[in-house]
Image (cartoon, rainbow, N blue to C red):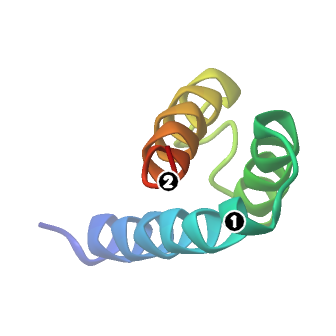
Amino acid sequence: MSKTKNWIMDIEEKLWDDVAKEIPNCEHETEAQAKAIKLADETGLLGNYIEVEQLEEAVNEMWNEFWAKFN
């Protein structure tokens, strides 16, 4: 793999870690999605490597997985 691809993958991995940390602090899934979009935009991944729809779907899965522990 190229250094650039490894670098982007590291940024993406950190993004998902940061999103996972935000989920417990959100009142609603849409709030978590908004935070994920903001974080992705700040990293430069949004629109270049990740689309909004991908973020929303991933946050939906993460949200359901997190809150399923409490049901």
Which residue is rendered at x = 11% and y = 66% of the image? 1
* Closer to us: 5 or 20: 20
Which residue is rendered at x = 58% and y = 44% of the image? 63
Tell me, yes or no, if residue 43 can be seen here. Answer: no
Label 1 Cα neighbours within 10 Å, binned few <14 / some 14-19 / many ≥20: few
| First-in-chain label (1 vs 2) | 1
How far, Cα to Cα, is label 1 from label 2?
8 Å
Residue that label 1 marks: 24
Which disc is residue 50 wearing?
none
Coordinates of residue 45 in the picture (x, y in percent):
62, 53
Q: Residue furthest top?
A: 53
Coordinates of residue 31 in the picture (x, y in percent):
88, 45
Which disc is residue 66 wearing?
2
Coordinates of residue 48 in the picture (x, y in percent):
61, 41
Is residue 67 shown above or below 1? above
Location of residue 10 by image quarter:
bottom left
